[in-house]
C-alpha cells in the first residue's frame, strides 16, 4: 500500500506526539522514582514528598497525558480528514 504525503504527515505527527508523551511519562515515573529518597526529605501536606508524588501526583499526570493525547489526536484526525467510521 502506497501512502500519500498526507498519510505520512499524519503518522509523523502521531509518532511525534506519542514519543513526546512517552518521554514525559518516563520522566514522571522513573526519573522521579530515582530521586524518591531525596524527595522524601521534604514534607508536603504532612507526607514525604516522594510518597505524595507517587501516590497522587503521578496518577493525575497520567490522566493529563491521556487527555492531551485524546484532544490532540482528535484535532489531527479532523485536520487530516481521518475518520473511524466506514
Image (cartoon, grey):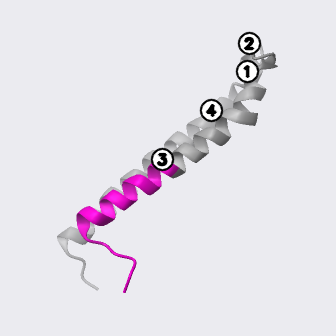
At numbered mark 1, what does the secondary structure look like: helix, strand or loop?
helix
Disc marking residue 42 = 2
Dominant secondary structure of the residues highlighted in magenta in the image:
helix
Kindly check if marks 1 and 3 are in contact, taking CB atoms under 8 A apart as contact. no
Examine the rendering and report whether any part of residue 74 can be seen. Answer: yes
Residue 54 drawn at (x, y percent): 73, 34
Q: Residue at x 73, y 12 (%)?
A: 42
* Label 4 Cα neighbours within 10 Å, binned few <14 / some 14-19 / many ≥20: few
Quadrant location of the N terminus?
bottom left
Magenta extent: 67-86
Q: CA distance from mark 1 to mark 3?
A: 24 Å
According to the picture, the residue beneath numbered tag 4 turns out to be 31
Q: CA distance from mark 2 to mark 3?
A: 28 Å
First in residue order: circle 2 vs circle 1: 2
Q: CA distance from mark 1 to mark 4?
A: 14 Å
According to the picture, the residue beneath numbered tag 3 turns out to be 21
Kindly check if marks 2 and 3 are in contact, taking CB atoms under 8 A apart as contact. no
Q: Residue at x 77, y 13 (%)?
A: 41
First in residue order: circle 2 vs circle 4: 4
- As drawn, the residue found furthest toward the left would be 5
* Label 3 Cα neighbours within 10 Å, binned few <14 / some 14-19 / many ≥20: some
Residue 51 vertical placement versus 64 (above, below): above
Amino acid at each position: 500500500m502506497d501512502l500519500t504525503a498526507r498519510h505520512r504527515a499524519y503518522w509523523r505527527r502521531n509518532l511525534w506526539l506519542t514519543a513526546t508523551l512517552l518521554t514525559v511519562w518516563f520522566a514522571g515515573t522513573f526519573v522521579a522514582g530515582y530521586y524518591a529518597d531525596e524527595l522524601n526529605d521534604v514534607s508536603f501536606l504532612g507526607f514525604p514528598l516522594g510518597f505524595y508524588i507517587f501516590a497522587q501526583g503521578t496518577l493525575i499526570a497520567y490522566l493529563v497525558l491521556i487527555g492531551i493525547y485524546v484532544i490532540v489526536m482528535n484535532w489531527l484526525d479532523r485536520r487530516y480528514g481521518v475518520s473511524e467510521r466506514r
